[in-house]
Amino acid sequence: MIDLRSDTVTLPTAAMRQAMMMAEVGDDVYGEDPTVRRLEERAAAFLGKEAALFVPSGTMGNQIAIACHTRPGQEVIVEADSHIYNVELATMARFSGVQPRVLVGERGIFTAHQVSSAIRPDIYYLAPTGLVCLENTHNGAGGRIWPLAGAREILDLAHGRGIPVHLDGARVFNAAVATGIPARELVAGFDSVMFCLSKGLGCPVGSILCGPREFIAEARRARKALGGGMRQAGILAAAGLYALDHHVDRLAEDQAHARLLAAGLSEIEGLSVWPPETNIVIFEIERGPDAATLCRGLAARGVLASPAGAGTSPRRVRMVTHLGVSRPDIERTLDLVARELGTAAA
Ligand SMILES: *Cc1c(COP(=O)(O)O)cnc(C)c1O
């Protein structure tokens, strides 16, 4: 099987498993796991933040950030196709008592001007804006990179109004590798940043939340409240340390594969392909079966892809490249998509 559904399907390599096996561990709820501490220190230093917290998932990292930045009764500015708004089960309402204020970006990216119009004026019957969230890369928009200049304008604007800004940086290292801008520069100025170890970085489990020291101390309490306190988690943290050493630069390979895939798909009749900026390729089937039917047909031929568009765009398909996908896999995928659509391979 060639599995292009997501970069979450990556399996730990033999060397990563070796690092996990050898990890020195302790009870992290007591603050006694040396490998978790090393990962948290390493991740914070890597992103130029004061402190970091190892969390079980990206969703938990985002939601802890929202809980720690806001008070119940506030609004959180999010993009319409963002992960936080679409696929985190309204957790900001359940856990933090806040409501989303949704902005529709241009293919996922909103402007400082839009944020400025969405920030509530200080009138007693309006819900105050408590937080702004950006997503880099933007998953629903096909792995788009949030332009740095635009992000900085939003940071300046929000901070000028006393509002913190959180970055859902699940794939921020993909953005760093694609642009050549170090991740620490891409996240500079954000009040908190979450990134996933369990996606393109190839770890089995885990994400990191970074921010100021007191913020992370509060985040540690919120993590425990959510049931995210883990014991001998150093076994998982060892995979994270290994990934930060060995799996960041290689994301360039995944991105080259995504470009190859997109170029090949765009030569197939009836497909309209979004130009990929990182490791996510999205295409619309303009003529032919709907996305679910195409994905079922491809699965029978040995290629897994996902219908995309969170249920609202039934002709949209997503393919994600990662460390388990080789160049021959891409070539084979192109051949099978062309066959499945009954057109000649280009
Ligand atoms: C995957 C993802 C998350 C959540 O990560 P999980 O570990 O699956 O909870 C958050 N934001 C974005 C943009 C993602 O792609």
Image (cartoon, rainbow, N blue to C red):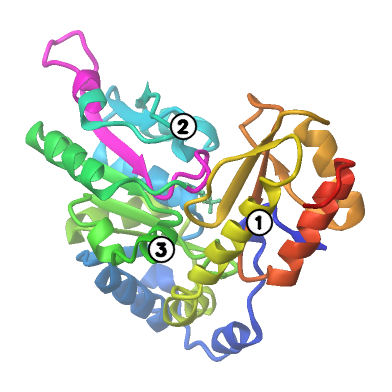
Mark carried by residue 85: 2
Q: Which mark is residue 173?
A: 3
Front one among 312 and 53:
312
Q: Is residue 276 above or below residue 332?
A: above
Return the disc, 2 or 1, that comes first in the chain's sequence.
2
Q: How busy is the neighbourhood of tag 2: few (under 14 within 10 Å), some, or many (20 plus)?
A: many
Q: Which residue lies under the disc numbered 1?
A: 261
Q: Is residue 156 left or right of residue 32?
A: left
The local secondary structure at tag 3 comes to helix
Residue drawn at point x = 50 percent, y = 75 percent: 250
Per the rendered image, the range of residues in magenta is: 115-143
In the image, what residue type sits under mark 1? Leu
Residue depicted at x 90% and y 41%:
342
Left or right: 91, with 3 as reference point = left
In the rendered image of this protein, does residue 337 appear above or below residue 78?
Answer: below
Amino acid, disc 3: Phe
